[in-house]
Image: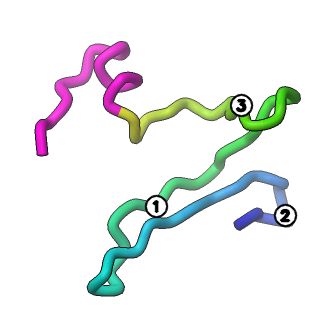
Amino acid sequence: MRNTADGLWMWVIVGADRKVMVFERDIHWIRFPGHRGTEKWLHDAWLAEKGYTVRQS
């Protein structure tokens, strides 16, 4: 969904039990369609690149 106040996007993943599993906000897209400009802090590769320990599920 899009925040019409600032033009940024947000999304949520809801599990089968109807509880929120993941929520991300303040996403912006760069001029090439499908490419996000926002840091990918939910993604393992981004976390590893920044030096964070990636938990194995």
Residue lying at the far bottom of the rendered structure = 18
The residue under label 2 is 5
How far across and how far down the image is residue 13, in percent? 44, 66
- For residue 40, side relative to residue 2 (left or right): left
Quadrant holding the N terminus: bottom right
Q: Residues within 10 Å of mark 3 (few under 14, many from 20)?
A: few
Task: Identify the residue at horizontal 69%, vertical 30% (top origin).
Answer: 37
In the image, residue 28 lies in the stretch drawn in magenta: no
Q: Position of residue 6 (x, y in %)?
A: 82, 55
Residue at the image point whose x is 68% and y is 34% from the top:
36
- Secondary structure under the numbered disc 3 in the rendered image: loop
Q: Which residues are magenta?
A: 44-57
From the top left corner, tell me how far across and down residue 39 is, in percent.
55, 30
Q: Amino acid at mark 2?
A: Ala
Question: Is 6 on the left or on the right of 22, as rendered?
Answer: right
Q: How many marks?
A: 3
Task: Say the numbered circle drawn on residue 36.
Answer: none
Q: Residue at x 35, y 86 (%)?
A: 18
**Label 2 crowding class (10 Å Cα cut-off): few <14, some 14-19, many 20+?**
few
Using the rendered view, name the quadrant where residue 7 is placed.
bottom right
Q: Nearer the viewer, mark 1 or mark 2?
A: 1
State which quadrant residue 47 falls in.
top left
Counting residues from the start of the chain, the first of labels 1 and 2 encountered is 2
The residue under label 1 is 23
Q: Which residue is mark 3?
A: 35
Q: Earlier in the sequence, mark 3 or mark 1?
A: 1
Near mark 1 (Cα within 10 A), the count class, few <14, some 14-19 or many ≥20, is few
Q: CA distance from mark 1 to mark 2?
A: 19 Å
